[in-house]
Amino acid sequence: MGLINRKNIGSKYEATAQKYLVQHGLHFIEKNFSVKCGEIDLIMREGDIIVFVEVKYRKTQQFGHAAESVTRNKMRKLVNSANLWLNKHNLSPHSTDFRFDVVAIHQNGDHIEWIKNAITEG
């Protein structure tokens, strides 16, 4: 699978996840926040909580659940990227409520699983 095709697929399922989260009461802030240490697929708000979202898609579960592909290394990159995003917006990680969620999409978008607090710092 070529890089362009993979990027198009990623964009499609990020849009699917964004729509799903908005339908469930979250407010969109930003997508594809990219810094040297990583990228955050979606940044949303639920009430006063900033929600950093990793979107994972798997056509089948033959090689495991989509959420299982969020490795410890990926978690560390997300945490570092989130801290940079907070800093860019003059928000402190010590006084701002935030969490890391995963939206796992399977079977061409027919099954969406939203996992709140899926990623813990550290």
Image (cartoon, rainbow, N blue to C red):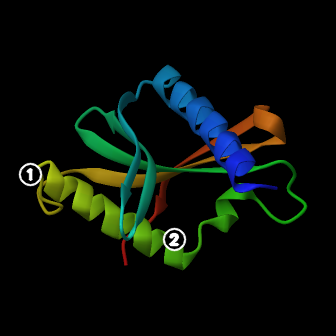
For this orientation, the residue located farthest to the top is 23
**Residue 120 visible in image:** no
Q: Name the secondary structure under disc 1.
A: loop
Q: Quickly name the residue at label 2.
A: 74
Q: Quickly name the residue at label 1.
A: 90
Q: Where does the image place residue 65, in percent across and percent down from the top left? A: 76, 59
Q: Is residue 97 left or right of residue 16?
A: left
Q: Is residue 22 left or right of residue 1?
A: left
Could you say which quadrant of the image residue 28 lies in?
top left
For label 1, the crowd category at 10 Å Cα-Cα, with few meaning under 14, some 14 to 19 and many 20 or more, is few
Could you say which quadrant of the image residue 2 lies in?
bottom right
Q: Where does the image place residue 40, in percent across and percent down from the top left? A: 43, 53
Q: Residue at x 85, y 56 (%)?
A: 61
Residue 3 numbered mark, or none: none
Q: Residue at x 36, y 45 (%)?
A: 51
State the count of labels: 2
- Circles 2 and 1: CB distance less than 8 Å? no
Quadrant the N terminus occupies: bottom right
Q: Name the secondary structure under disc 2.
A: helix
Residue type highlighted by circle 1: Asn
Decide: is 16 above or below 62: above
Q: Where does the image place residue 121, in percent across and percent down from the top left? A: 36, 71
Of the numbered discs 2 and 1, the one sitting upstream in the chain is 2
Q: Where does the image place residue 5, in percent across and percent down from the top left? A: 74, 46
For label 2, the crowd category at 10 Å Cα-Cα, with few meaning under 14, some 14 to 19 and many 20 or more, is some
